C-alpha cells in the first residue's frame, strides 16, 4: 500500500509572488482640488511609475481617500527622499498617509483556541500562495491544535490564560510578537478578550473573526442566540480589534441563509464556511494594503 503524503510533504502550489519592487501609498485628507495631481507629480518626479490607483470621496464627511500602487524599480532618488517629498505634500494638504513596500513580506501570527477550521483554512491558503506573507508563529491558550501547526512546520506556542495570570501571559505574548517582528495578528477564533494595552500596542494590526453578522449577536454564543431568535440569515464579520468588544472597524462581512429546520449544530456548520471566507478575504486585503481606517469605519479598495 502506498502511504498518503502528509500535508507537510506536499510542495506548495504558489501564485506569482508580488513584485518586490513595488510600493503602495494610502492617503486620506479633507477633500479639495489638486490632490490627485499633486501625488502623481511627486511620484513621477522621483521616477516612480504608477501601476494602478483607486480613490473614494466620502461626500458627507468631506474626506478624500486614495490608494496608489507604483513601481520603485527605477526611482531616481532613495526611499528617504521620496518619503520626505510625500510628507511635504501631506503637510500642505492636511493629509494622513502610509507608505508600504512589497518587500520584505509581512509577518503574521495566528492566535487560536480550540476551534480549528479558520486555522486550517489560513494555513492551506498560505501554502497555496493565496496569502502573500510569512507565518512564523501560532499562539494558543490550549495545546489541542499543536498537531495542526506541526503539519505545516509552524512553531506553536502555548500561553495558558487564567484570571490571575492573564496580564503576565499577555506581556509574554507581546514580547514574543515583538521579538518575531510580527506585523499582523489574526485572531482565528481565539476565545480570549485582549486587554486594552495589547490592542493599543498593535492598533489596526489585529484582525478578529466574529461568528455573527455584526452588530447583531455580539459577544459570546452568537449561534445559540441566533437559533433562539429564529433568524433566517447568519453571518460572519472580520474587523480590527479595539478596546470595545466586537465594535472595531469592519473589514468584511458575509451571510448564508438558514431555515427553521436548522439546529444549533447545523448553524455552526454553515457558519464555519462563512467564517473561513470572510477571514481570509480580510487578511488578504490587509496584506495587500487595501484597507484604510478612518473613525470606526474602513475604506477597502478593490
Image (cartoon, rainbow, N blue to C red):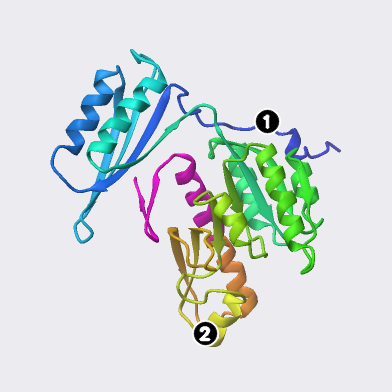
Stretch of the chain drawn in magenta: 275-302
Q: Quadrant of the C terminus?
A: top left
Q: Indicate yes or no whether the magenta region holds residue 283.
A: yes
Q: Residue 11 bears which disc, if any?
A: 1
Q: Quadrant of the N terminus?
A: top right
Q: Indicate yes or no whether the magenta region holds residue 169.
A: no
Q: Which residue appears at 40% of the width and 29% of the height?
A: 23
In this picture, is 24 found above or below 231? above
Q: Percent from the top left, x then y, of residue 236? A: 50, 65
**Mark 1 residue crowding within 10 angstroms, few (<14) / some (14–19) / many (20+):** few
Label 1 sits on a secondary structure element that is: loop
Label 2 sits on a secondary structure element that is: loop
* Quadrant hosting residue 69: top left
Q: Percent from the top left, x then y, of residue 11? A: 68, 30
In this picture, is 277 found above or below 48? below
In this picture, is 98 found above or below 29? above
Q: Which residue appears at 49% of the width and 63% of the height?
A: 237
Give the mark, 2 or 1, whose residue is nearer the N terminus: 1
Q: Which residue appears at 78% of the width and 48% of the height?
A: 157
Describe residue 203's horizontal placement relative to residue 23 as left or right. Answer: right
In this picture, is 80 found above or below 188? above
* Quadrant hosting residue 96: top left
Q: Residue furthest right?
A: 1
**Mark 2 residue crowding within 10 angstroms, few (<14) / some (14–19) / many (20+):** few
User: What residue is disc 2 on?
Assistant: 260
Q: Residue 25 bears which disc, if any?
A: none
Distance of label 2 from label 1 (alpha carbons): 44 Å
Q: Which residue appears at 58% of the width and 43% of the height?
A: 125
Describe residue 95's horizontal placement relative to residue 59 as left or right. Answer: right
Q: Percent from the top left, x then y, of residue 73? A: 39, 16
Q: Are marks 2 and 1 in contact (CB under 8 Å)?
A: no
Q: Percent from the top left, x then y, of residue 191? A: 67, 65
Amino acid at each position: 500500500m502506498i502511504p498518503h503524503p502528509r500535508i507537510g510533504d506536499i510542495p506548495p502550489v504558489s501564485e506569482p509572488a508580488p513584485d518586490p519592487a513595488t510600493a503602495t501609498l494610502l492617503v486620506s485628507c479633507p477633500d479639495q482640488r489638486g490632490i490627485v495631481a499633486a501625488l502623481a507629480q511627486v511620484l513621477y518626479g522621483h521616477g516612480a511609475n504608477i501601476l494602478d490607483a483607486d480613490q473614494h470621496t466620502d461626500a458627507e464627511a468631506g474626506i478624500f481617500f486614495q490608494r496608489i500602487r507604483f513601481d520603485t524599480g527605477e526611482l531616481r532618488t532613495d526611499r528617504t527622499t521620496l518619503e520626505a517629498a510625500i510628507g511635504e505634500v501631506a503637510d500642505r494638504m492636511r493629509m494622513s498617509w502610509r507608505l508600504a513596500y512589497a518587500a520584505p513580506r509581512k509577518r503574521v501570527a495566528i492566535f487560536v483556541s480550540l476551534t480549528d477550521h479558520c486555522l486550517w483554512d489560513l494555513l492551506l491558503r498560505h501554502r497555496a500562495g493565496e496569502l502573500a506573507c510569512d507565518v512564523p508563529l501560532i499562539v494558543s491558550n490550549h495545546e489541542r491544535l499543536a498537531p495542526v501547526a506541526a503539519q505545516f512546520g509552524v512553531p506553536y506556542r502555548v500561553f495558558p490564560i487564567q484570571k490571575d495570570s492573564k496580564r503576565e501571559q499577555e506581556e509574554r505574548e507581546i514580547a514574543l510578537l515583538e521579538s518575531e517582528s510580527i506585523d499582523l495578528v489574526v485572531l482565528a477564533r481565539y476565545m480570549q478578550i485582549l486587554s486594552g494595552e495589547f490592542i493599543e500596542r498593535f492598533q489596526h494590526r489585529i484582525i478578529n473573526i466574529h461568528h455573527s453578522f455584526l452588530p447583531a449577536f455580539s459577544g459570546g454564543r452568537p449561534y445559540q442566540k441566533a437559533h433562539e431568535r429564529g433568524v433566517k440569515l447568519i453571518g460572519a464579520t472580520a474587523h480590527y480589534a479595539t478596546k470595545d468588544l466586537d465594535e472595531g472597524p469592519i473589514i468584511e462581512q458575509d451571510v448564508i441563509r438558514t431555515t427553521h429546520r436548522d439546529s444549533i449544530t447545523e448553524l455552526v456548520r454553515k457558519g464555519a464556511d462563512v467564517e473561513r471566507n470572510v477571514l481570509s478575504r480580510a487578511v488578504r486585503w490587509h496584506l495587500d494594503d487595501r484597507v484604510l481606517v478612518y473613525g470606526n469605519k474602513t475604506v477597502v479598495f478593490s
